[in-house]
């Protein structure tokens, strides 16, 4: 296999616009502990400690696109009940997402409740309907979708079988998408794939591929045979088959050698929504200009990260960079995969929180002194460099907590940041005085500081001890506080003001 198609520019994922149409679901996760068996029946009693609601189905595709920074028009039909209202409220909270919500009265919203204990699902309860939307609503859906297509670079159809897509609706969407030159990515439902005929890429999982093709899918060769049957029967340009622990397989209609991508998952915590992640990453990659193999390779890696998280999870650009850094030494042994994903040495310094804690343990075993500072670092200037140099001078390893784009926007206003978090992380990682960069999404770094437990906490002298987030915590276990000297006249705000004048 050779996927040497050039390096991936992750920032390009935010440059194209997508249209996602699909069945939106409310995923509710009820978490707790089991300490006894019920007296009423031989069943465990779950003592609830937490309850979380997330967008599921096509809504999870939209969430994944949002996390990638990919501008998206999201089109769906909901009802007028409490579930639908909660779905609508979650949709409007997503960055980079423009919801186009059509409401059909007396249509029930779809809810899936998962009960979880000790990281394992005990029970799932589905409250859903597959009654087709009304004819006038289907017409409104098509009219809206067609009006949005000229402004988009790709179309996602996320079919969860909840009545949004009739064969007639699908036929029009696919035909109009092709007329507009959009790559059409379909996450299918059921066994009759004739309703998706003419789509560019269809993404069945292993079981769906077997059911739709009527063929076994036990190994690489049989998966390719089954995929080619779908391509021949329904005029698909490619099949991307997700295969769980076996990874994924890309089969093209043009006779290109099939590509088998092995799973990159280290730990599997929850597979909920992993297919949504694949659809989102592949579609965003295609719109960004990646070829299918490169987009699928990236999607396969990101799916491996998602299943290590709880619930219908998403992965941010900074987490993808951290995963690239973590696997860099392994990837060097697999040149094809290295070329496909485009790893950079500086990215070795960009960590996810979990991987950072592992690295800190290694440093601590070596007796090294850990320092921590944080900031937005929107436009790196001499004041920043001076602070980081001083910080590195009082520790053996310096960790920089970097505010995410969403966090900066909440703190600084909608016109900030000037540079995306992936670019800011890259710049910091390129500095020799910085040993680790980790992105945090909260308004303050307190939770991160509590996890890192640095030996020394560093800020500039424009902060007092009382103003320093985490100072009390660090001092509580004997850690130190260091206030760095400031270089007068340097700040991002002042720089932007001078540029505007």
Image (cartoon, rainbow, N blue to C red):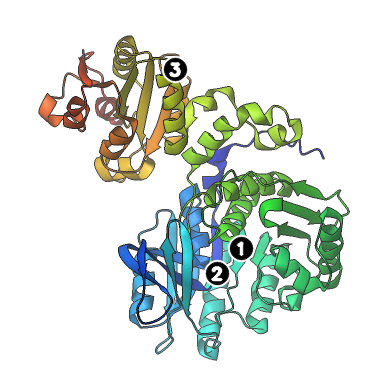
Residue beneath disc 3: 431
Say what secondary structure mark 2 lies in: strand
Find the distance from the CA under tag 1 to the CA under tag 3. 40 Å
- Closer to us: mark 2 or mark 3? 3
Find the distance from the CA under tag 2 to the CA under tag 1. 8 Å
Please state if 331 lies on the left or on the right of 432 as rendered: right
The x, y position of residue 283, in whole percent, is: 62, 55
- Taking depth in this image into account, of 227 and 479 the one nearest to the observer is 479
Question: What residue appears at the point 49 percent right and 25 percent down from the top-left corner?
Answer: 349
Crowding at dot 3, Cα within 10 Å, few <14 / some 14-19 / many 20+, comes out as some
The quadrant of the picture occupied by the C terminus is top left
Residue beneath disc 1: 155
Residue beneath disc 2: 21
The x, y position of residue 237, in whole percent, is: 79, 61
Question: What residue appears at the point 21 percent right and 32 percent down from the top-left corner?
Answer: 470
The quadrant of the picture occupied by the N terminus is top right
Find the distance from the CA under tag 2 to the CA under tag 3. 43 Å
**Closer to the N terminus: mark 1 or mark 3?**
1
Tell whether label 1 touches label 2 (CB within 8 Å): yes
Please state if 357 lies on the left or on the right of 344 as rendered: left
**Closer to the N terminus: mark 2 or mark 3?**
2
The x, y position of residue 262, in whole percent, is: 71, 46
Please state if 80 lies on the left or on the right of 423 as rendered: left
């Amino acid at each position: 296999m050779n996927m040497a198609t050039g390096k991936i520019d992750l920032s390009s994922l935010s440059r194209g616009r997508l249209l996602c149409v699909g069945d939106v679901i409310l995923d509710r996760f009820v978490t707790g502990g089991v300490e006894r068996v019920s007296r009423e029946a031989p069943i465990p009693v779950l003592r609830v400690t937490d309850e979380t609601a997330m967008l599921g189905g096509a809504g999870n595709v939209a969430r994944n696109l949002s996390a990638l920074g990919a501008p998206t028009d999201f089109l769906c039909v909901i009802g007028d009940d409490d579930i639908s209202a909660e779905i609508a409220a979650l949709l409007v909270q997503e960055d980079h997402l423009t919801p186009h919500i059509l409401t059909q009265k007396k249509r029930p919203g779809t809810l899936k409740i998962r009960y979880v204990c000790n990281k394992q699902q005990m029970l799932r309860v589905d409250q859903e309907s597959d009654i087709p939307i009304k004819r006038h609503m289907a017409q409104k859906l098509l009219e809206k979708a067609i009006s949005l297509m000229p402004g988009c670079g790709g179309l996602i159809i996320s079919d969860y079988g909840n009545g949004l897509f009739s064969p007639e609706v699908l036929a029009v969407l696919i035909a109009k998408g092709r007329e507009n030159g959009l790559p059409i990515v379909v996450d299918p439902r059921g066994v009759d794939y004739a309703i998706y005929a003419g789509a560019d890429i269809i993404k069945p999982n292993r079981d769906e591929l077997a059911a739709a093709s009527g063929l076994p899918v036990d190994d690489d060769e049989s998966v390719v045979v089954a995929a080619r049957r779908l391509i021949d029967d329904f005029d698909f340009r490619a099949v991307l088959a997700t295969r769980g622990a076996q990874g994924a397989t890309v089969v093209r209609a043009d006779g290109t050698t099939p590509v088998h991508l092995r799973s990159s998952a280290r730990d599997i915590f929850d597979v909920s929504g992993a297919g949504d992640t694949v659809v989102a990453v592949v579609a965003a990659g295609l719109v960004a200009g990646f070829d299918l193999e490169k987009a699928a390779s990236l999607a396969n890696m990101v799916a491996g990260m998602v299943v290590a998280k709880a619930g219908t999870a998403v992965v941010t650009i900074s987490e993808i960079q951290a995963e690239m850094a973590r696997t860099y030494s392994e990837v060097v042994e697999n040149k094809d995969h290295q070329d496909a994903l485009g790893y950079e040495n500086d990215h070795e310094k960009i960590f996810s929180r979990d991987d950072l804690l592992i690295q800190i343990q290694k440093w601590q075993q070596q007796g090294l002194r850990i320092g921590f500072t944080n900031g937005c670092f929107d436009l790196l200037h001499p004041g920043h460099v001076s602070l980081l140099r001083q910080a590195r001078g009082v520790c053996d390893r310096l960790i920089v907590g970097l505010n995410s784009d969403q966090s900066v926007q909440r703190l600084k206003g909608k016109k900030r940041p000037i540079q995306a978090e992936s670019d800011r992380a890259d710049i910091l990682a390129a500095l020799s005085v910085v040993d680790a960069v980790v992105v945090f999404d909260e308004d303050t770094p307190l939770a991160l500081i509590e996890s890192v437990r640095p030996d020394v906490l560093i800020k500039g002298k424009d902060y007092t001890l009382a103003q320093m987030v985490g100072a009390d915590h660090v001092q509580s276990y004997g850690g130190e506080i260091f206030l760095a000297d400031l270089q007068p006249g340097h700040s991002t705000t002042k720089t932007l003001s001078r540029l505007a004048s």
